[in-house]
Amino acid sequence: MQLHNWSVVSSNQSPYLAPELRKIQLCGKVYGHPNFPNGSIVTTSSIVKVIGTSVYTHSGSKYNLKKVNKKYRKWCKQQWPDRQWNPKKPIRTIG
């Protein structure tokens, strides 16, 4: 499955939960999903593994990341101005 115009989002969890314990998900337009028409906006289950531009989720799905959402990319630049964007590894994980 492919995810276009994607961004990283945090699931609705307690605001008191430490940031490193929060589960992250993806939101974007999906193509090739067996349960959704192409171009449907979806939010994935939590991310469990990232290898390059391939993201694996708790539900067992694998998403290939395509173009990132422009607003999300701009936000990332503002949050981490010293961090270089790597299109071959666009999501960084801890651990």
Image (cartoon, grey):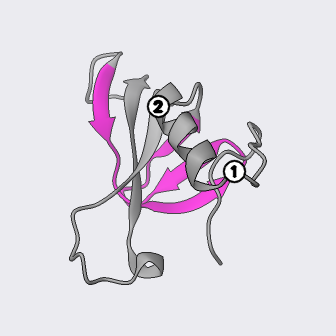
Q: What amino acid type is highlighted by mark number 2? A: Lys
Q: Which residues are magenta?
A: 40-64
Residues at marks 1 and 2 touching, judged by CB atoms closer than 8 Å? no
Q: Is residue 15 left or right of residue 51?
A: left
Q: Note whether 63 is above or below 80 in the view shown.
A: above
Judged from this view, the residue extending furthest toward the top is: 38
Q: Looking at the image, can residue 10 be seen?
A: yes
Location of residue 84 in the rendering, given as x and y in whole percent from the top left corner: 78, 47
Q: Note whether 76 is above or below 80 in the view shown.
A: above
Real-space CA distance between mark 1 and mark 2, rounded to the nearest whole angstrom: 15 Å
Identify residue for label 2: 71
Q: What amino acid type is highlighted by mark number 1? A: Pro
Location of residue 69 in the rendering, given as x and y in whole percent from the top left corner: 49, 29
Estimate how packed mark 2 is, as few (under 14), some (14 to 19) or many (20 or more) residues with alpha carbons within 10 Å: few
**Residue ID at (69%, 51%):** 81
Quarter of image, res 39: top left
Magenta-span inclusion, residue 24:
no
Magenta-span inclusion, residue 49:
yes
Location of residue 36 in the rendering, given as x and y in whole percent from the top left corner: 26, 25
Q: Which mark is residue 81?
A: 1
